[in-house]
Amino acid sequence: MFDTLSDRLGGILDKLKRRGALTEADVGEAMREVRRALIEADVALDVVRSFTDRVKNRAVGVEVIKSVTPGQMVVKIVHDELVATLGSDADPIDLNAPAPVPILMVGLQGSGKTTSTAKIARRLTERAKRKVLMASLDTRRPAAMEQLATLGKQVEVATLPIVAGQSAVQIARRAIEAAKLGGFDVVMLDTAGRVTLDEALMAEVAEVKAATGPHEVLLVADSLTGQDAVNTAKAFDGRVGLTGIVLTRADGDGRGGAALSMRAVTGKPIKLLGTGEKMDALEDFDPHRVAGRILGMGDVVALVEKAAENIDIEKAKAVAEKMRKGAFDLDDLREQLNQMQKLGGMSGLMGMLPGVAKVKNQIASANLDDTLFKRQVAIINSMTPKERRAPKLLDASRKRRIASGSGTRVEEINRLLKMHRQMADMMKAMGGAAGKRGPLAGLAGMMGMGGGGPSPEMLKQLAEKMPGGAPGGGLPPNFPGLPGGGLPPTFPGGLPGLPKGFPGLGGPGKKK
């Protein structure tokens, strides 16, 4: 969502960082460019003015003049002000109330309200270990009720049985009573939506709120609608009093203005970001981490959290040990590829690493997408178990058979085998502590997780190492697993020399 804004701000601030000393004119010119970039990103005009004025006042002050690296200091100031604009501190869903805690979900039709309700219910069940009941109050669209019931089965969360003829308020009261009798901790109330704001919608939502006394009133807003999302938030807040916002479709190509404007205009915190259609595609909104992404500093903590959720630690350790001993076969490579897909693919992982934003165009040109990983897995699946264990058996005849069976070409099989050899040789050569971790066995080890998941203290340390330690977008010097704070020269593709050809994945522009 922030790619365009990130590119613009990155270019502007890079010019400042290259200068040994900054004058007021330099800062003024940069702020004009920043103002233009924010307006193009659909940020509210009042927010833009306030933001650039605050940055300029600090940037021409004593703190920059006395700094050893004035350009870097301005980047830090921009980062700090972005954090302040986005809300300073993370503000998760508050469950500190007597059970069952009612959570009222409001928003316009098509904003992703029902899906977000199920995502949040799943998150509260799995992470907070709460017993959740969901109820659809959309009496005008029976399909919405059925959709919530279907999603409830998918995420294994209970939904209130549908009773025809009841009003939204009657359903809400029945949900609260059922939750009390069933020993539920949380009740998610999914209200009806409209295509546009109207009095009937507001009156119904206000009536449901009065009847249930929700502890949280969350607006689900589509980030791709830009300033319309901000206007919707203002309208709902004025009528029912919001406690937070869930911003959906944050993985889209929107310009990011809604996120930057929402907190400043409404005063309400963004609590969660919807980042995809899958039920686990939901992230906590942390202003520090989002500001880091916007300025190309990456989001290491999100990467660690994703690794902790998706990596099978025991399986990773077993594969890493095989790699260290040089016994890494194609079955193990397939496991690595599958884990990379779970973590969002190579491009998704790279987007979270500090400093890599600057070469994301090269990453894109190397065709690092999910389709490519699937093709590689298909190649390995077309081999016999014996061939996967001993790739040296693959002569020309066998390669033609595998290419036919996987719908690929012999050249792709050769690239895959080359990548396998390079990964095995690299990890065997590294040996010791680094080799034990594997390339993605791998990611858990790279993040310093060792044999288990990351502790809260570790996540805190990583968060502290983020923007403050790397205001220019680079890795901190002591970033775990990456010597000297940069990607190792032997990293596949040699970032930032990626266009030379990512081993086994084809060169830039070679679409298969």
Image (spheres, rainbow, N blue to C red):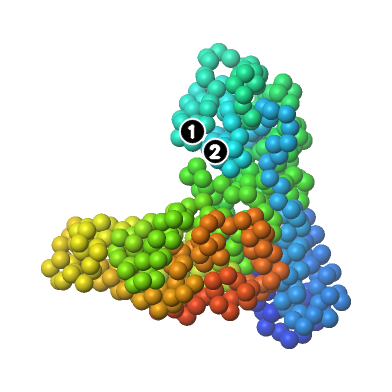
* Structural crowding at the residue carrying mark 1, measured as other residues with C-alpha within 10 Å and reported as few (<14), some (14–19) or many (≥20): some
Location of the C terminus (image quadrant):
bottom left
Which numbered tag is attached to residue 71? none
Q: Residue at x 81, y 70 (%)?
A: 56
> Measured along the vertical axis of the image, is residue 162 above or below residue 395?
above
Under mark 2, the amino acid is Arg
* Structural crowding at the residue carrying mark 2, measured as other residues with C-alpha within 10 Å and reported as few (<14), some (14–19) or many (≥20): many
Element marked by disc 1: loop
Q: Residue at x 49, y 36 (%)?
A: 155
Residue beneath disc 2: 122
Under mark 1, the amino acid is Glu
Residue 428: which quarter of the image? bottom left
Which numbered tag is attached to residue 156? 1
Residue 304 in percent (x, y) is at 56, 59
Is residue 451 something that shows in the picture? yes
- Count up the numbered dots: 2
Residue 414 in percent (x, y) is at 25, 72
Q: Residue at x 25, y 56 (%)?
A: 381
Element marked by disc 2: helix
> Measured along the vertical axis of the image, is residue 441 above or below residue 99?
below
Residue 372 in percent (x, y) is at 35, 61
Q: Residue at x 62, y 67 (%)?
A: 297
Which is nearer the eye, 240 or 424?
Answer: 424
Could you tell me if the residues under marks 2 and 1 are in contact, i.e. CB atoms within 8 Å? Answer: yes
Q: Residue placed farthest to the top in the image? A: 165
Q: Earlier in the sequence, mark 2 or mark 1?
A: 2
